[in-house]
């Protein structure tokens, strides 16, 4: 199966327009969004942009109802009322309301979670660390990936606030291994990259996130992953 990955959004509603165009033009039937829908540089008081971004996500969810969604640390920060860097107190009510709206249009509540598996690919916002699995999943289930994912997706958001969690892990910068690297490709966001980059069993996708010097232009690459082989191609914007 060919799966389109929507990298971290961070208040760029046009990303969903581009994603929909790629889906239709290339007849791709499945998408996974790595989320972090809210928050971006110098946009804390731009509440209409928060509304627009979530509405674009909701419209995409309606148009492509099989889409899977991976909780990001920015969504969880609002759910947990954390005052993390970049969080907007002005948009707090809007984000919480729009998260409920997004959940409400999904055909199945399990379509939004910390980790999803399609074939040989694991999708999560930041990466599924082996240490996190061993800490939260019984050893006898370790080799049953679907059981592992089911268990992790039932964890409370409070359990995600560790450096090796699926919403905060940065495997690009640590020697800590990902879960079963011999079996799965991990498609992740969270850690910014200049372009979609594959290293070993790690596909880093967060290439739309802006830095102050980049301005507000939407640019980047959408990866499409073959979930049978682990190969990928990119569609630039």
Image (tube, rainbow, N blue to C red):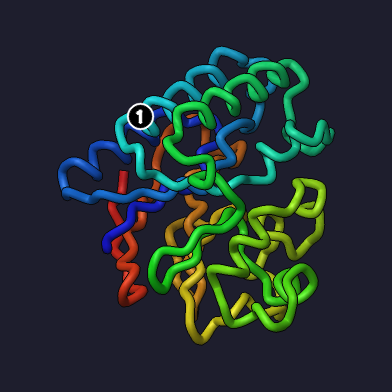
30 to the left or right of 201: left
Residue drawn where x is 39% and y is 44% of the image: 67
For the question of whether residue 106 can be seen, the reply is: yes
Relative to 134, residue 152 above or below: above
Quarter assignment of residue 142: bottom right
- Nearer the observer, 66 or 107: 107
Q: Position of residue 25 (x, y in %)?
A: 15, 43
Q: Position of residue 124 (x, y in %)?
A: 56, 57
Number of marks present in the image shown: 1
Quadrant, the N terminus? bottom left
- State the SS at label 1: helix
Q: Position of residue 33 (x, y in %)?
A: 46, 46
Residue drawn where x is 77% and y is 68% of the image: 136
- Nearer the observer, 189 or 59: 59
Relative to 14, residue 97 above or below: above
Residue drawn where x is 36% and y is 48% of the image: 31
- Nearer the observer, 199 or 63: 63
For the question of whether residue 192 can be seen, the reply is: no
Residue at label 1? Answer: 62
Q: Position of residue 231 (x, y in %)?
A: 32, 73
- Nearer the observer, 64 or 225: 64
27 to the left or right of 151: left
Crowding at mark 1 (Cα within 10 Å: few <14, some 14-19, many 20+): some
Residue drawn where x is 71% and y is 56% of the image: 168
Quadrant, the C terminus? top left
72 to the left or right of 31: right
77 to the left or right of 185: right
């Amino acid at each position: 199966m060919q799966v389109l990955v929507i990298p971290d959004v961070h208040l760029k509603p046009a990303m969903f327009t581009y994603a929909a165009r790629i889906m239709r033009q290339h007849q791709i039937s499945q998408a996974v969004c790595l989320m972090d829908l809210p928050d971006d540089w110098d946009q804390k008081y731009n509440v209409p942009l928060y509304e627009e971004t979530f509405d674009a996500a909701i419209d995409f969810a309606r148009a492509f109802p099989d889409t899977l969604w991976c909780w990001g640390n920015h969504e969880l920060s609002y759910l947990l009322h954390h005052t993390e860097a970049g969080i907007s107190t002005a948009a707090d009510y809007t984000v919480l309301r729009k998260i409920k709206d997004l959940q409400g249009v999904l055909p199945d509540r399990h379509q939004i979670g910390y980790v999803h598996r399609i074939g040989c690919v694991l999708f999560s916002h930041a990466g599924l660390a082996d240490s996190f699995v061993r800490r939260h999943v019984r050893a006898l289930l370790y080799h049953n990936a679907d059981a592992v994912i089911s268990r992790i997706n039932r964890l409370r958001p409070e359990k995600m606030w560790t450096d090796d969690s699926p919403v905060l892990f940065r495997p690009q910068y640590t020697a800590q291994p990902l879960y079963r690297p011999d079996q799965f490709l991990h498609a992740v966001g969270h850690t910014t990259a200049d372009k979609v980059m594959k290293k070993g069993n790690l596909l880093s996708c967060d290439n739309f996130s802006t830095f102050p010097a980049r301005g507000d232009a939407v640019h980047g690459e959408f990866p499409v992953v073959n979930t049978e082989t682990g190969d990928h191609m990119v569609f630039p914007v």
